[in-house]
Image (cartoon, grey):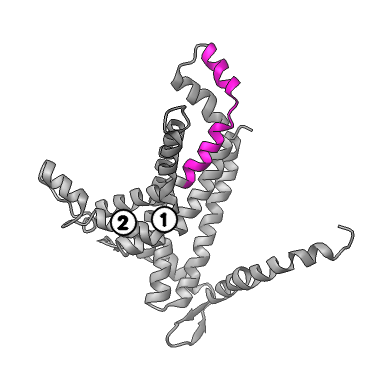
Amino acid sequence: FRGRWLPWLLLLPTLLILGVFSYYPALRTLRLSAFRANLIVGNEQFVGLGNFVTLLSSPVYHQVIVQTLVFVAAVVIIGLMTALGLAWLASQPIRGAKFYRLMLIYPYALSPAIAGTLWLFLFNPEIGPVNNLLGTLFGVKPRWLDQPFLAFALVVVATIWKGLGFNIVFYLAAIQNIPKEVMEAAEIDGATPWQGFWRVALPLLSPMTFFLVFTNIVASLFDSFGLVNILTRGGPVYGEAGITTFLVYQLYEDGFRNFKTGAAATQAVMLLMLVICLIVLQFRYGGSKVHY
């Protein structure tokens, strides 16, 4: 740029939008976390780090943290493995490949509310197609949303299904960019299809895997709210809290149902710190496994 101020002038609209809708709310949330506040009453009482002490000493919050970490690990690991396997199969030169790819990507186009409603209907214990099929074949009709572990597993599977299309798109692009000469050389050297995938293709896909691990961690922490709210509303109760009450849903419960805005702001700060810690660990220990 010839002028010194022209770059800033071009960035000004974006900076204004970020400032109003991202930076300012973030600073307000950080400030609010130091106060005991109620949205209905409207009064604020400065407590400093009191909200953090109360939160970290709460058995309910301890259970929610553990459930969230287990949920994130299950969604990221199982989801990426499933997406990679399906993307690898969809990349093969078979008839109707474009149609199969479109159908695999389609779930990502649905909103969380629609996806949650769809799964709620499918696994309805009385009229759901899944229970009707299980009742006809095996004579059983599980209470998917009433039994804690079944409800947790259902939310995990629904979240994986919802994000499958996103992961498949990126893995498909990465697989199609693998040089054919490399795979042909491995085949000539006597590598089996499994050895070619495990020892040649998988290391070449590591940059994409590294990226998808990051995006899936963030998505499972934040984007799971819609599915949980439609399917289970955080329940059923198991121990001190609902077994599908994750950090983002607990934040919603305290902030918008119990109107404890100070506690909700504290949880938002804690959630941000958790994301930062997970990403730092990923870059510190996962970056060495990436081959460019």
Residue in the picture at 22% in, 54% down: 144
Write down the residue under mark 1: 110
- Compared with 131, 176 (above or below) is above
Residue 175 shown in magenta = yes
* Label 1: element kind: loop
What range is drawn magenta here? 166-188
Q: Residues within 10 Å of mark 2 (few under 14, many from 20)?
A: some
- Compared with 18, 277 (above or below) is above
Identity, as a three-letter code, of the amino acid under mark 1: Leu
* Label 2: element kind: helix
User: Which percent across, then down, holds residue 248?
Assistant: 43, 63
In the picture, measured across the screen, residue 73 lies left or right of residue 243, that is right
Looking at the image, which residue sits at the far right?
2
Residue 205 visible, this angle: no
Numbered circle sitting on residue 131: none
- Evaluate if marks 1 and 2 touch, with contact meaning CB atoms under 8 Å apart: yes
Residue in the picture at 48% in, 80% down: 36
- 3D distance between C-alphas at marks 1 and 2: 10 Å
Q: How many marks?
A: 2
Residue 161 shown in magenta = no
Residue 195 visible, this angle: yes
Q: Quadrant of the N terminus?
A: bottom right
- Compared with 61, 180 (above or below) is above
Q: Quadrant of the C terminus?
A: top right
User: Which percent across, then down, holds residue 66?
Assistant: 38, 54
**Disc with the residue nearer the chain's start (1 vs 2):** 1
By secondary structure, the bulk of the magenta-drawn segment is best described as helix
Write down the residue under mark 2: 118
Of 67 and 106, nearer the camera is 106
Identity, as a three-letter code, of the amino acid under mark 2: Leu
User: Which percent across, then down, holds residue 77?
Assistant: 43, 42
